[in-house]
Image: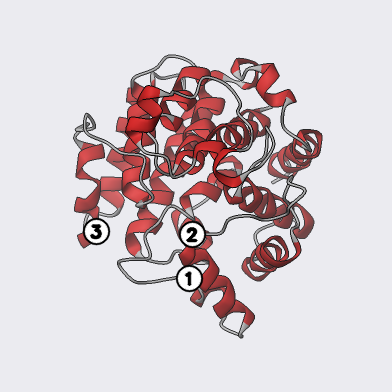
Amino acid sequence: MKVKDGIIGLVVGDALGVPVEFSGRYDRKIDPVTDMREYGTHKQPKGTWSDDSSMTIATMASIVNKNGINYEDIMNEFINWAYDNKYTNSDDGRFDIGTTTGRSLRRYERGTPALESGGTGERDNGNGSLMRILPLAFIPDIDYDTIEKVSSLTHAHEISRIACVLYVEIARSMLEKDLEIAEHVKSSCDKIKDYYKDCPSLKKFNKIFNNDLDDVRGRTFVVGSLECVIHCLLNTDNYEDAVLKAVNFGEDTDTTAAICGGLAGIYYGYDSIPKDWIDEINKIDEVESLCEDYETFCNGI
């Protein structure tokens, strides 16, 4: 089941990165993550996921419950997560939320329409929509405009919207074609370059387009995150090494590994994800059940 491949891949990557979030690359070099850890940055037990997984799960739940994409309902589920701890697997509830995401949810709460709530400034280009966009890749014939709108709920700047479309395009290529990772990336980049050829922000993606990814970082800037993820995928040959490489870049470890884990899970398959890592994650059975419901929805379109 391809939905489970990607979503469990994302959740596991997220949980691997949570204990060392905000640590530096040097810290990870002298003390590399090689397995699930506990406590650390957020003082959470092993297998705790963060906002990356929570917002991904909330998106899927909304789409299943509404039998399609309803932007207001997705935002309502984000509110349920942010304020009522829905879609978390920690006893402490939600313990992290991105700045741009938080501002967007507050705008929506005050009455701003869902599609006008997202941040539109140059500084609103963190990876907070990229980290939750993967479910759209499984929807047959999903169009770029819809992907952009789902990003725009929290991150509406052109750079974030293009990043989400590129990521979904790579995931779709992996779902549909039998190619090497580099070929998936190149064919997806070619589509993006053609579709957005008149967009000034496209130049921000030149390092990805030119495969100039030797000097990357695990930072929160959406394009930087995508650069790091693609670098990790291109320089490993299995799920485990890809997500560990992502975590050990340091900085935004949970999100980088979640974004990487989603693609690595699709490419290498569910069985490539270490079972002992999956077993460490509280409520993973609930996520797998939702994946089944979501796949049923996608197959019914």
The first of marks 1 and 3 along the sequence is 1
Q: What amino acid does circle 1 point to?
A: Gly
Circle 2/circle 3 CB separation < 8 Å: no
**Residue at the spot of label 1:** 118
Identify the residue under disc 3.
201
Query: Which percent across, then down, holds residue 210?
Result: 19, 35
Q: Between 200 and 250, which is closer to the camera in this rendering?
A: 250
Q: On the image, which quarter does residue 18 sit in?
A: top right
Q: Secondary structure at mark 1?
A: loop
What is the quadrant of residue 173 in the picture? Answer: top left
Residue 261: give x, y in percent of width and height: 52, 31
Q: Secondary structure at mark 3?
A: helix
Q: CA distance from mark 2 to mark 3?
A: 16 Å
Q: Residues within 10 Å of mark 2 (few under 14, many from 20)?
A: many
Q: Which residue is the site of mark 2?
A: 151
Viewer can see residue 141: no
Residue 16 position in % (x across, y down): 57, 31
Three-letter code for the amino acid on which mark 3 is drawn? Ser
Answer whether labels 1 and 2 touch (C-beta < 8 Å): yes
Quarter of the image for the N terminus: give it.
top right
Q: Amino acid at mark 2?
A: Ser
Q: The residue tagged with tag 2: helix, strand or loop?
A: helix
Determine the CA span between mark 1 and mark 3: 18 Å
Above or below, 239 relative to 49: above
- Residue 130 lies, with reference to residue 270, above or below; the image says below
Q: Residue at x 80, y 37 (%)?
A: 289
N-terminal of the two: label 1 or label 2? 1
* Residue nearest the observer in this picture, 151 or 174: 151
The disc placed on residue 102 is: none
